[in-house]
Amino acid sequence: MTALAVVSMALAPVAASAQQAAEPNPLGLPDEVNVIGENDPNTRTATAIVNGHVITGTDVDHRLALLLSSSQRQVTEAELVQLRQRVLRNLIDETLQIQSAEAQEMPVETAQIEQTYARVAAQNFGQDTQRMDEYLRSIGSSPESLKRQIHGELSWQNILGRNIAPFVNVSEEEVNETMKRLEESRGTDEYNLGEIYISATSENQQERLQLAQQIVEQLRQGGQFQAYARQFSEASTASVGGELGFVRLGQLPMELATVAQEMQPGQLVGPVPIPGGFSILYLIDKRQVMMADPRDAIASLKQISITFPANVTEEIAARRVDEFVTGVQSMRGCGDADEAAAAMDADVVTNDQIPIRQLPDQLQNLVLQLQVGQATQPFGSISEGVRVLMLCGRDDPQDYSGPSFDELMAQKEDERINKRAQRYLRDLRNDAYIEYN
C-alpha cells in the first residue's frame, strides 16, 4: 500500500494528450541571458507563505514522504531537490483551493475530512484508522498531512460543483455527432494511456531528458505511475495521475500514436521526444471501439494445486510435478477433477463467478484459449506450489452497443469541467500573494 495511491478524488481524465508544443519565444526574450547576481533555486528553503498561510518545511517533508513511499529505490540528493520543489508547488495549489472555498463560504467540515480519512483506512487497513496513523508516521509522514490533502481535494470539489460544473453546457448535436463517429469507427483500437509530460526547451533539453530518464528508472523499479504523474507531469492530467482515458490513435500527437500502437497493456515506454518536451507512456488497457471484450467473460474455474514440504529436494519436487502433470492430463473434464485430484493428493478450489479480467495478465490469455474441460499449463514454483486452472464454463459478454447518450454527455461535460478547472486554478495562482523563504 502506498499512501499517495489511496486518495483519488480529482477530475475525470481528459480524453486527449494534454501537453502543447511551446511557442517559439512568445515573450520576445533575447537569445542570450545574463543573470544579474546569484541565483541558485536549489539553495532556497522549501517554505512559503500563501496569502498569509504558512507552508513549513515539515509540511513539505511529510508530503514528500507520501511520495517516496511509492518508490522502491533510494533517490539521489538531486532528485530530492526536484521532488521538494514539486511538492511545494502542489502544497501551494492545495492551499489556494482551500482558501478559495472558504472565501466563498464553502468550507469543508472537519467531519467530512474524518469520514473520508476513515474510508481510506477501510480500503487499506480494514477500517483500522490507528493502523493507518502508525503507517504514515513510520514512513516519516503524518495523519495531518494526508488529511490536509483530503481537505484540499474536497474543497476543490466544492468549488467545481458550484462555480464551474453548473455553467458547462454540451449540446445534443455534439453528442449525436460523437455517437455517429463512434459507430463509424467500430472495431478500431482504443488505448487507455497514462502520460507523464516533462517540458523542455533547447537550452535545458539535456537536463529535462535526464529527469525523464530518472523517472522511468524509478517506475521500472516499482514506483507507482499515478504518484509520479501527480508530482512530476506538467500536463493538465497530472491531477488524475496522468490518465488520458481511452483514446484512439488519431487523437494523439503523431509521435505518441506511433509508440502507443506497438504497446501492450502494462507496458511502460519513454521518454518519447515530442514537440516541447518528453512524454513517458504507460498503457493501462486496450480495447476495440464498441466491441465486446472477451476478458469481460465470467468463468467457472477449478484451481488444482499441489504444495511441497519445506525441505523437499529438487529431484523429489520434479518427480512430484511430473506426476501432477500426468494426472491433470488424464482428467476427463471438471466432473472428474475432484476425484482425480484427491487420488494424487492435490487440492481443489472452485470459483463459479470470476471475471477473466481479474486474473493476472498471463493467465487471462491462457484461460481465453481453453475449451470447457481443458486446463492451463502448470504454473508456480516449489516455494509457492504448482497449480493449473481448469475451465468448467464461460459466460461470454454481450455485444457492446457503445456508450449511451447520457454517458457521452457526462464524458464531454467532465472534459470541459477539467479544462475550465485548470484555468480557474491558474487564475488563483495569478492573484495570490506568495512569499518564499
Image: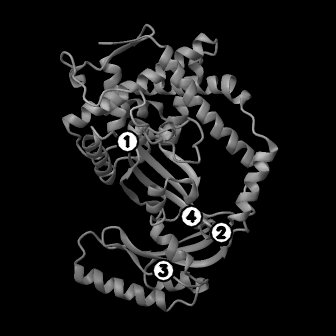
Within the image, what quadrant is residue 354 found in? bottom right
Quadrant showing the N terminus: top left
Residue shown at the point (59%, 29%) measured from the top left? 421
Cα separation between marks 4 and 3: 16 Å
**Of label 1 and label 3, which has the lower sequence position?**
1
| Residue 361, above or below 430 | below
- Counting from the top left corner in percent of width and height, residue 230 is at 43, 38
Give SS at disc 1: strand
Residue shown at the point (75%, 39%) measured from the top left? 170
Foreground mark, 1 or 4? 1
Cα separation between marks 1 and 4: 32 Å
**Of label 2 and label 3, which has the lower sequence position?**
2
Q: Contact, CB < 8 Å: mark 2 with mark 1?
A: no
Q: Please say whether residue 233 is visible from this viewpoint.
A: yes
Q: Which residue is mark 1?
A: 198
Cα separation between marks 2 and 3: 29 Å
Q: Which residue is mark 3?
A: 376
Foreground mark, 4 or 3? 4
**Of label 4 and label 3, which has the lower sequence position?**
4
Residue shown at the point (69%, 66%) measured from the top left? 186
| Residue 222, above or below 396 | above
Give SS at disc 2: loop
Cα separation between marks 1 and 3: 43 Å
Q: Amino acid at mark 3?
A: Thr
Q: Which residue is mark 2?
A: 187
Residue at the far right in the pictured view: 172
